[in-house]
Structure formats: C-alpha cells, structure tokens
C-alpha cells in the first residue's frame, strides 16, 4: 500500500495538466514510451503545423530530426516520427521557419502570422490563403521574454495579440510558449514565464513550457538557478555544473539519449524538447494521457476544502500520525513556496491569498503516509 501511495504521489505531482480545452506540456511530458504509436500516426494524419522561431526555437525541430533515427534504433516502425513541410511519405506536416523571426519581435510576428494564414475564412475558422490547411501555429521566443516583462509589454505585445489571433482564426490551435531560461536576468525571466503559465492555466490555453523542460533533468531533479545551456548555479551565482553534460556522461548515447543539434545548449535538452513536442502533437490529435487520479486522501484520513478556493484551504486530519505531519507547497513550476509542520492537530488552514491565481500542489508527508493534493486558487 505504501508503494502504491508513493507512485500515486509522483504521478500527481506536476502532471501534464489538462484543464477543459487547455493543455500544459512541461517536463513531465517527455516520456516517448508513454505515447501510443496510434496517437503519433493520428497526429501525422490530422495536424498541419507552422512553426516560427530563431535559434533557441530550433532546439525543438533539431531534436525532432535526431529523434527519427533514434526511434528506428529503438525498434519502432521505420521513420515513425518523420516530419517535413507538406507531410510527404506519411510524415508529420510541419513547416519549419514558416514565419520569419520569433515571437519577441512585435508587431512583426503578428503580421507575419496573418500574412502566412491569409484572410480568416468564417467557414473553416482557418486562413483562406495558400496555407488554408494549417491548423496549428506555434511560435518560440529567443531572449526577449525577460525584457518584455521588465518593460511591461508582455501583455500587450504577446498575450493580447495571441488572444486576438485565436478569436480571428478559431479553427487554428495557437500554442503559447514560455521563453528559454536566462540565468543572467533570473528574476525577470522567472516572473515572465510564470505570468505566461498563470495566464494559460487560468484561461484554458495550450502551453508548451520551454523553460520548465530545461529546468529538470531526466531523473526529475529540479535546478532552480539554471541557464539555457543547462548549466546550473548556487543561489549566490556560483556555477555548480551542467545537468545535461553530467547526465550524458553517465548514460549511453543511442541508448538513453541521442546526439543532435541543440543551439546554445546540449543535445539532451533538444532530446527532451522533441519528446515534449510529440506529446503535444499527439494530445492535439485527441490522445488523452492517463491522468486518472485515485483519491487516496480519504483513505489516509485527509481532507482539503474548499478546493477550488480564493486562497484559503482547510486541511482536516481524521487519523493520528506519529512523528508529525509535514506540508510542502509548490507552484506549477515545481518551486517550493513554503513548508509548514503541524504536530497532531486535527484541522488547520493553508493560506495562499498572497499568491497569483493558478494551480498549486500540497504535498503531505507523515509517518507511513504520503500523498499530493492539487490546489486551485481562483
């Protein structure tokens, strides 16, 4: 029972989050083995994708290119993950560099999107030009997300135009994206990416969380102070290592990871960006990852209410646990906000009223019991 509870806890902590029509793709969306082959085939049949990016964004497509041979070696059907512009020979139809620049160049990225799609066609909800089949638009950032947040233009030059495009082309799925990590502008970078996450979660958008993916190694270790090249640092700025290089050096190439291009970074980073991309494509094509949650809280004697809440959550303990109970609270990015320990109290309060609206996770530990509860602040 204890092992079962622990496995449930890990599946609950920071899962792929699907909220109504919203999708969040993050570091937990990087296990290719979990994506059924049928879902990959369905994505290739249904999706017509246009991708706009500069150098950092190429990590995604360079990773996807290297993934083709890697999957072949793994024994999957030949060229299962192939892609090209046009979808010839049964490949995924993905037009790389479809639109010039990246999403940091406003208003160019908006104008280039409209020019690429053409005049909105009310009958299809897509464009009416030569790319009328395109039903997915994805843009990446380069280094501008931090500066836009600092200048106060993230809303007006990114979020608002994305919403307007969604309204004008309702037949096209627009993918929001966080920017790459920027250790040298850490505070603004974290705040900008958090603002994008919070908006997407609150409004049921589709998010490819670029920054979150490069904050974790494949073993799930979180690097709070990391850079886009996968180097990680202490709180005072001392470089401690490079998680991707460390992992590559202790694992076998073409077995655990594959070599590929990865601008400004390491191959492993692009590997994980490619896995997450295919998780996204499969989900957009209708695959529903198994996110069924078994409610162990009542069996363990815990209740959390009300949930959702404006920020005040009551925790009730219906059984006695020796050694005290520890409560750790994390935000959607996996950053621990605070830890509160209460010893043998039957009911008490968790207060998140000072935090932005969104999803949080309450990890509860006591002797012989561990589980995680998702908290929704609205």
Image: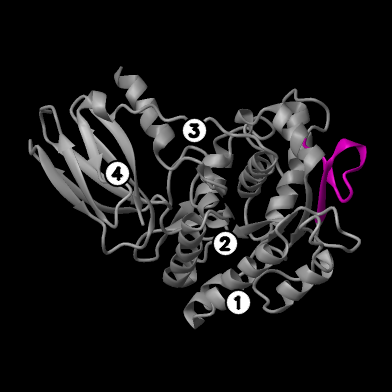
Q: CA distance from mark 3 to mark 1?
A: 34 Å
Which residue is identified by label 3?
Answer: 291
Q: Nearer the viewer, residue 50 or 307?
A: 307
Residue occupying the point 79% across, 39% down: 44
Crowdedness near tag 4: few (<14), some (14–19) or many (≥20) residues, C-alpha within 10 Å: many
Q: Residue furthest bottom?
A: 151
Q: Are marks 4 and 2 in contact (CB under 8 Å)?
A: no
Per the image, the residue denoted by label 4 is 362
Residue 212 position, x and y percent, is 51, 53
Residue 68 visible to an observer of this rendering = yes
Tell me which corner region of the image, top left, top right, bottom left or bottom right, holds residue 95: bottom right
Q: Which residue is label 1 attached to?
A: 157
Q: Relative to 238, say whether 317 is above or below.
A: above
Q: Are the two marked residues, 4 and 1, in contact with CB atoms closer than 8 angstroms?
A: no
Of badges 3 and 4, the one in the foreground is 3
Does the magenta run of residues contain 336? no
Q: What range is drawn magenta here?
A: 81-95
């Amino acid at each position: 029972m204890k092992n079962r509870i622990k496995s449930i806890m890990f599946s609950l902590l920071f899962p792929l989050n699907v909220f109504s029509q919203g999708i969040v793709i993050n570091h937990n969306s990087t296990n290719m083995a979990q994506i059924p082959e049928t879902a990959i085939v369905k994505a290739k049949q249904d999706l017509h994708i246009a991708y706009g990016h500069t150098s950092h964004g190429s990590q995604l497509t360079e990773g996807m290119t290297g993934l083709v041979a890697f999957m072949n070696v793994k024994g999957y059907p030949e060229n299962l993950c192939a892609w090209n512009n046009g979808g010839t020979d049964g490949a995924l139809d993905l037009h790389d560099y479809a639109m010039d620049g990246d999403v940091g160049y406003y208003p160019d990225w908006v104008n280039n999107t409209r020019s690429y799609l053409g005049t909105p066609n009310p009958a299809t909800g897509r464009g009416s030009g030569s790319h009328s089949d395109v039903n997915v638009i994805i843009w990446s950032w380069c280094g501008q997300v931090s500066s836009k947040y600092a200048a106060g233009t993230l809303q007006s030059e990114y979020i608002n135009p994305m919403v307007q495009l969604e309204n004008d082309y309702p037949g096209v799925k627009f993918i929001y994206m966080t920017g790459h990590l920027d250790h040298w502008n850490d505070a603004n970078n974290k705040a900008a990416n958090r603002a994008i996450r919070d908006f997407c979660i609150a409004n049921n958008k589709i998010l490819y969380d670029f920054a979150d993916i490069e904050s974790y190694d494949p073993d799930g270790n979180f690097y709070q102070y990391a850079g886009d090249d996968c180097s990680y640092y202490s709180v005072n700025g001392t470089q401690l290592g490079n998680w991707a290089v460390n992992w590559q050096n202790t694992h076998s190439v073409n077995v655990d990871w594959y070599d590929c291009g990865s601008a400004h970074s390491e191959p492993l980073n692009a590997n994980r960006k490619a896995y997450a991309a295919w998780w996204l494509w499969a989900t957009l094509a209708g695959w529903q990852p198994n996110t069924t949650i078994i409610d162990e809280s009542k069996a363990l004697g815990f209740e959390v209410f009300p949930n959702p809440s404006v920020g005040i959550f009551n925790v009730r303990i219906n059984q006695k646990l020796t050694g005290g109970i520890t409560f750790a609270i994390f935000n959607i990015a996996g950053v621990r906000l605070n830890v509160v320990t209460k010893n043998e109290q039957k009911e008490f309060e968790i207060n998140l009223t000072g935090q932005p609206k969104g999803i949080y996770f309450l990890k509860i530990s006591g002797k012989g019991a561990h589980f995680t509860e998702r908290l929704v602040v609205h």
